[in-house]
Amino acid sequence: MPKRLLLGIGNPFLKDDRAGLEVVYRARLRGCPWETQELYTVGFELLDKIKGYQEVFLIDAAQWGASPGTIIQLNGQKLRDPHLSTINTHSMTLGHTLEIGYRLFPKEMPLEIWAFLIQAGDIEHFAQELSPPVERAVEDVLKCLEGIWLSGDRGAFQ
């Protein structure tokens, strides 16, 4: 069983929605020793990507009304709580998807999941570059992840 996965989620064509994908791309360039993958949608494909790993780090752009570039870190049950909306098959949140995975595949799901969610500023325009506050957040997330893969310290998540 592979030990760790860094998974970037996003749309590579939408300005700030590409933040998670950009983190994974840059982590590869910096020598990330973990397995790395991209995911272009959040749905049940997420479960196929993360099953079989002991530890998963998810990076995604999000919109929750904060200032662009704000980073929220979640782990464990906080990440799995489907608290953002009611469950229906047309509006599954990340939390809903993870909770379903843990209920259906408890032995295959990661022991630990960590997430960096970056508040997007612009997810409506097609562009290959990030807005300046999201660019700074991507670099901040990379520094934290690099500290984890170099030292194993997860203090940033405690």
Image (spheres, rainbow, N blue to C red):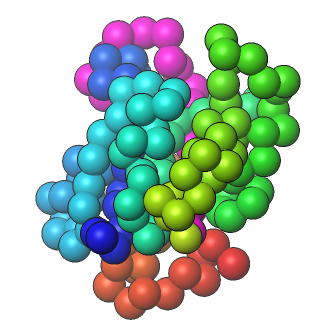
Q: Residue at x 53, y 63 (%)?
A: 107
Up/down of 130 relative to 74, above or below: above
- Where residue 101 appears, as percent x and y from the top left, is 58, 45
- Count of numbered circles in the view: 0
Q: What residue is drawn where x is 42% and y is 51%?
A: 50
Residue at image point 37% right, 27% down: 40
Of residues 42 and 103, the one nearer the viewer is: 103
Determine the image quadrant of residue 48. top left
Figure quadrant of the C terminus: bottom right
Foreground pick, 51 / 139: 51
Q: Is residue 23 magenta?
A: no
Rendered image quadrant of residue 12: top left
Q: Which residues are magenta?
A: 112-133
Determine if the magenta segment contains residue 127: yes
x%, y% of residue 22?
31, 42
Q: Is residue 72 visible?
A: no
Residue 155 showing in the rendered view: yes
What residue lies at 60% left-to-right and 83% top-to-bottom? 155
Quadrant holding the N terminus: bottom left
* Apparent side of residue 140 relative to residue 31 in the rendered image (left or right): right
In the displayed structure, would residue 148 be above or below residue 6?
below
Q: Is residue 129 left or right of residue 97?
A: left
Residue 62 location (% of width, % of height): 60, 33
Where residue 137 appears, as percent x and y from the top left, is 49, 50
Which of these two is toward me, 45 or 62?
Answer: 45
- Reply above or below: 46 against 131: below
